[in-house]
Image (cartoon, helix red, strand yellow):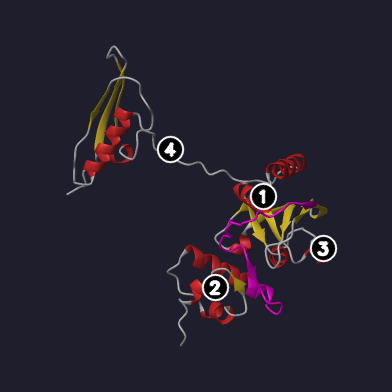
Amino acid sequence: MAAIEKKMRIQLFDKEFNMLSDRLVSQDIELKGPKEKHDGPIRVEFALFDQDDVPLCITYLRKLLENLPLELKEKKVKISEIDSESREELLKAVMAQATNQEQLIEILREKGFRFLTPDHISDLGLKLEIEEKHKDFQFMVLCMKEAKIASNDRYDPQLAFGIKLLGDKIDRILIYLYGKFDSRVKLEWPAKVKVSFQKMEMVKFPPYMKLEEREKFRNELRMLNANPEKVPSKFFGRWMDDVDFKEKEVIKGKISVA
């Protein structure tokens, strides 16, 4: 027997009950949420084909009668490189808004900036010339695109904020503009630091680990963070004790020792 095509009829009227439109639409699609609001009488004809249709129809009618928010598809905004003028305006706005380093981190995260270590910046080939005396800082850089594979992420290195997270914290941050050191700005840490450092932000590799090995490790770590049920590979397990990262103890429990 051929499957029944579910249809529903929607009629819209003005306040004098003059018909404005009469549509026959796919019931399954329409029950996901009405596509438009209508201020006036509405006639809806649908059928309950199975138990699953009951809560869908109830929710649909509530949205029509109570004027609840419609189901709207979220538009993904693609971040692109910013021009020089906008970059400098962003720097001024961020520094004027942030009263301490914790707040600065939160503001930058909202704008798409992420932490990268100097080694990671070098591995990605970003044109960000970090001075040797600043190698103990971590840098927030604008992420323009996050790929499934960490080594394929895209960043705009023309504006970066150096913040010292590891070891003793200092009340100074570094500003790198157009790929080079620009200035050192005094900005205190709050008395109690509440900021949480997200996964993948703080990965520190030993100096003897090769570039290909670092990239492979980062890529697998991203997959493990995205899928907690995934079992780490033998390669990942071999490097576990040599690499310093936030989720080590959580992931370590999933590695079976043969």
Mark 3 highlights which residue? 131
User: Mark 4, residues whose alpha carbon is within 10 Å: few (<14), some, or many (≥20)?
Assistant: few
Mark 1: few, some, or many residues within 10 Å (few <14, many ≥20)? some
* Labels 4 and 1: the sequence-earlier one: 4
Amino acid at circle 1: Leu
In magenta, the rendered stretch is 185-214
Going from the N terminus, do you reach mark 3 or mark 2 first?
Answer: 3
Image marks 3 and 4: residues in contact by CB distance under 8 Å: no
Q: Is residue 206 magenta?
A: yes
| Cα distance between the residues tagged 2 and 1 | 27 Å
Residue 233, above or below 20: below
Sequence-first tag of 3 and 1: 1
Q: Is residue 198 magenta?
A: yes
Question: In terms of image quadrants, where is residue 152?
Answer: bottom right
* Marks 2 & 1, CB-CB < 8 Å contact: no
Q: Which mark is residue 104?
A: 1
* Residue 25 appears in the picture as rendered: no
User: Mark 2 or mark 4, which has the lower sequence index?
Assistant: 4
The circle drawn on residue 248 is 2
